[in-house]
Amino acid sequence: MSVLELRRVSRVFRGGAGVHELDLALAPGEIVALVGLNGAGKSTLMRLALGMLRPDSGQVLLDGRSLARAPRATWCGVGHLVEVPLAYPELSTRQNLALAARLHGAGGSCVDAAIEQWKLTPYAERRVRRLSLGNRQRVGLAAALQHGPRLVVLDEPTNALDPAGVLVLRDALLRRADEGAGVLVSSHHLDEVARIAHRIVMVNGGRLIGELSPASTDLERTFFEHVRLDDERREAVA
């Protein structure tokens, strides 16, 4: 059974932007990377997968159940970061992580482990609003992953991270997948996601237009060629 599945999911906004008839399944232990240009629909897809947006048509399933029928235990097993880190700016790093742990039904011991893993010890008692963008991103990622989620959904998680943070993230996602979690991650860094992804799915114009093998050479050139050909096909039909 898939951890996450989108069946012919569409959501169109005023003006025509959105996503159209998406079919995507994420298996346990699988890392799937979404790649696309700005405005391609990656963030919208992730918001639909997490129930932040409702589809106009189609169905989203978590562990084989529709989002509306997924029990609390299923939602407790989800970790996500979409667009901006979810944190209370007036609370400290430790307080934010403790709240996130409670929301996911996790014990407090995971907070100390997350602070150590994400190299946040010097900032543990500092208010999040006083942190750099990179350290805020670390707090958001720690909150998303500290409870050992079965499903991980991350939108551009390397934003503002320094190279050391990217390495921590890479190790954390590989560990989650090794322990059976499904991981869906979007990125415009093809070389980086190719290091960890089992599949790379291309998004353009709100549609899934194919897959790339992480082992392929010259991924960037191949990706842009797929986008160019898809743009030409859509212009010919319009």
Image (cartoon, helix red, strand yellow):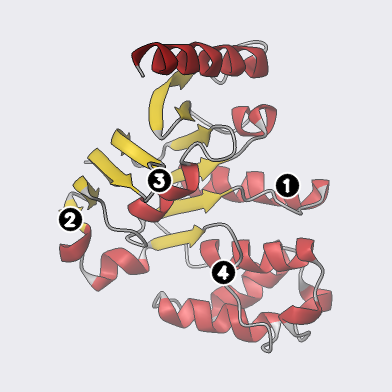
Indicate which disc, 4 or 3, sits on the residue closer to the N terminus. 3
Indicate which disc, 2 or 4, sits on the residue closer to the N terminus. 2
Q: Nearer the viewer, mark 2 or mark 1?
A: 2
Residue receiving disc 4:
143
Q: Amino acid at mark 1?
A: Val
Report the disc number at residue 79: none
Q: Nearer the viewer, mark 4 or mark 3?
A: 3
Q: Is residue 25 visible?
A: yes
User: Which quarter of the image is occupied by the C terminus?
Assistant: top left
73 vs 53: above or below: below
- Per the model, the C-alpha gap separating discs 4 and 3 is 35 Å
- Per the model, the C-alpha gap separating discs 2 and 1 is 33 Å
Residue receiving disc 1:
166
Q: Does dot 1 land on a helix, a strand or a loop?
A: helix
How dense is the environment of label 1, judged by Cα within 10 Å: few (below 14), some, or many (20 and up)? some
- Per the model, the C-alpha gap separating discs 1 and 3 is 36 Å
Q: Which is more toward the observer, 5 or 207?
A: 207
Residue receiving disc 2:
66
Q: Which is more toward the observer, 36 or 78?
A: 36
For residue 134, side relative to residue 149 (left or right): right
How dense is the environment of label 3, judged by Cα within 10 Å: few (below 14), some, or many (20 and up)? few
- Per the model, the C-alpha gap separating discs 4 and 1 is 16 Å
Asked whether disc 1 touches disc 3, contact meaning CB atoms under 8 Å apart, the reply is no
Q: Nearer the viewer, mark 2 or mark 4?
A: 2
Question: At which x and y percent is residue 21?
Answer: 26, 34
Indicate which disc, 4 or 1, sits on the residue closer to the N terminus. 4
Indicate which disc, 1 or 3, sits on the residue closer to the N terminus. 3
43 vs 208: above or below: below
